[in-house]
Image (cartoon, rainbow, N blue to C red):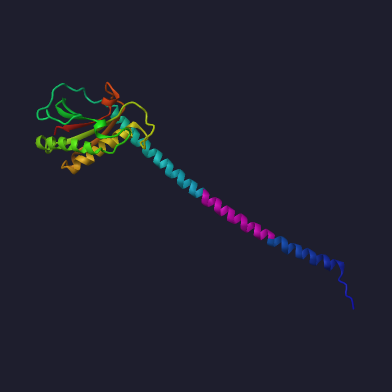
Amino acid sequence: MNIRMPSVMLAAIAASSMLVGCNNAQKDELAMLREENSQLELQRDEARSALDASESERRRLEEQLGNTQARASEQPPAATTSTPTGFENLPPGVTAETRNGEVVLTIEGDVLFDSGKATLKTDAKRTLDKVVSEIKKQYPSSRIRLAGFTDTDPIKKSPFKTNYHLGFERAFNVGEYIATKGIDQSRIHYSSFGPDAPKSSKKASRRVELAIVNE
């Protein structure tokens, strides 16, 4: 016996099937959208974190540069021609003079470092050994002020962002070394004048000055 369903019932069943299919498709699409949204939020959070870190580093570098430039604006006092007693036989590349009652030793940058670098040469350590020996004999408890100077050529092939950074790292590495030879680290102060106090030549401009500070 053939039973025919009313056309209205067939239409209802078809519509119901289509509705179920649409609902499943909508659920799948919604799940995909939620997953995509979650990934976008994660990427946004990562981008914000990277931006915050970059901004923090920028502020730190600006503050550091501002500090070194402020110190650089204070030009070193003019040197006199007198040679302090006890420093007449310094190693090649090192000179001594008296400035406003302070003994200042000038060490040529090319004696200490390769171009654009802040790592001490092996021969530089022998030079500094002799300098430290004289300081310990004559000024065993005085404070030391180390200042780094560079030529005026802009930084190109170097890991240092500016000449101020290079000058500071050079002064700091000299201080780190002489500390291993018996100069108390707490007695050492650092600064950088970068290219702001040039001398008559680029070679002469590249230097580290070690001032023995009067108590």
- Residue, x 48% and y 46% (percent of image)? 48
User: Is the residue 7 above or below the residue 29 in the image?
Assistant: below
> Which quarter of the rendering shows the N terminus?
bottom right
Q: Quadrant of residue 157?
A: top left
Is 151 on the left or on the right of 57, as rendered?
Answer: left
Where's residue 63, x and y in %?
Answer: 35, 36
Residue that extends furthest to the front in the rendered view of this protein: 123
What is the quadrant of the C terminus in the image? Answer: top left
Position in image of residue 121 (x %, y %)? 25, 37
Using the image as rendered, state which of residue 81 and residue 56 is in the foreground: 81
- Seen from the viewer's position, the closer of residues 39 and 107 is 107
Q: What range is drawn magenta here?
A: 25-43
Residue drawn at x 79%, y 65% is 14
* Image position of 3 (left or right of 144): right
Q: Nearer the viewer, residue 175 or 64?
A: 175
Q: Is residue 28 magenta?
A: yes
